[in-house]
Amino acid sequence: MDPIDSLIAGYRNFRRGSYQENAERYRLLAARQQRPKAMIVCCCDSRADPALILDADPGELFVVRNVANLIPPYQPDGQYHGTSAALEFGITGLEIGDVIVMGHAHCGGIAALLDAENGRAPKGEFIGAWMSLVEEVATNVKARTPHGSREELLRGMEHEAVLRSMAMLRTFPFVREREAAGKLRIHGWFFGIATGELSIYDARLDRFVNVPDVEASRKS
Ligand SMILES: [Zn+2]
């Protein structure tokens, strides 16, 4: 089937199914300002869809997607900063209290960064400059694991790039202020694609830890 025809067929399924079942919810969502639970910055990659992974309903997630889920530094220079505009609106406009940076395995942007580090700059006019936001990640990971396989280097870079983005998020004054006041939390997450597993960065352990499939019983 033509790819566009298959998407339109999917839309018709949505209209007959999920939309019909949730028509009242959609009407209420349209009647008032959105109040998402969290903001998530994730990759454009078609295999790492946050709403699907988190089983989130319409209105629950404020999503920004860009190549390799990067956050640029605070740079109020009048240029076209799409991710920064979304951060500003989500955090200062919608007053979202949790921002998640979600990386993923097999990221094409990170692979382009490793290739550039190895002397093969990406073709095209934009990806190289965009990925240079985290270029020190390639140098750091290569220095730490000089004999690592390509897969090991990529995984290490994918993880570290999430941490770099979390650090760059803190260059925004409105983020720093809200975090210091206890009004904003910043989270680093990672999705494995093949395994379907989500892991969360634990600052005390300084590593990503898998989320158990079943909630542990709480100690009283
Ligand atoms: Zn990616």
Image (cartoon, rainbow, N blue to C red):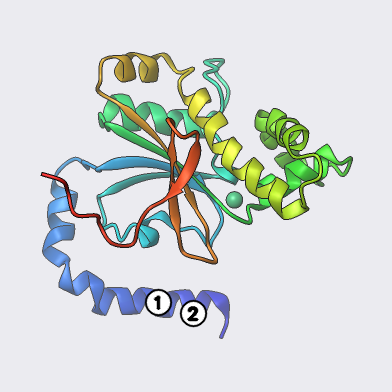
Q: Is 38 left, or right, of 146 in this rendering?
A: left
Please report contact status of discs 2 and 1: CB closer than 8 Å, yes or no: yes
Can you name the residue that lies furthest to the front here? 219
* Residue occupying image coordinates x 77% and y 52%: 149
Can you name the residue that lies furthest to the bottom here? 1
Q: Mark 2 points at which residue?
A: 6
Q: In the rendering, at what x and y percent does residue 42 appear?
A: 48, 46
Q: In the rendering, at what x and y percent does residue 129 appear?
A: 72, 33
**Disc 2 and disc 1: Cα gap in Å?**
6 Å
* Residue occupying image coordinates x 74% and y 46%: 112
The relative height of residue 189 versus residue 98 in the rendered view (above or below) is: below
Which residue type carries mark 2? Answer: Ser
Can you name the residue that lies furthest to the right here? 119
Q: Is 36 left, or right, of 46 in this rendering?
A: left
Q: For numbered disc 1, what is the local secondary structure? A: helix
Q: Is 131 left, or right, of 56 in this rendering?
A: right
Tell me, for residue 23, which label it has, or none: none
Which residue type carries mark 1? Answer: Gly
Query: In the depicted view, which residue is nearer to us: 100 or 26?
Result: 100
Residue 71 shows in the view: no
Tell me, for residue 10, which label it has, or none: 1
Query: In the depicted view, which residue is nearer to us: 64 or 207?
Result: 207
* Residue occupying image coordinates x 72% and y 46%: 153
Query: In the depicted view, which residue is nearer to us: 210 or 110?
Result: 210
Residue 126 shows in the view: yes
Dot 1, how many residues are within 10 Å of its Cα: few (below 14), some (14-19), or many (20+)? few
Query: In the depicted view, which residue is nearer to us: 28 or 186?
Result: 186
Where, by quadrant of the figure, is residue 120 drawn? top right
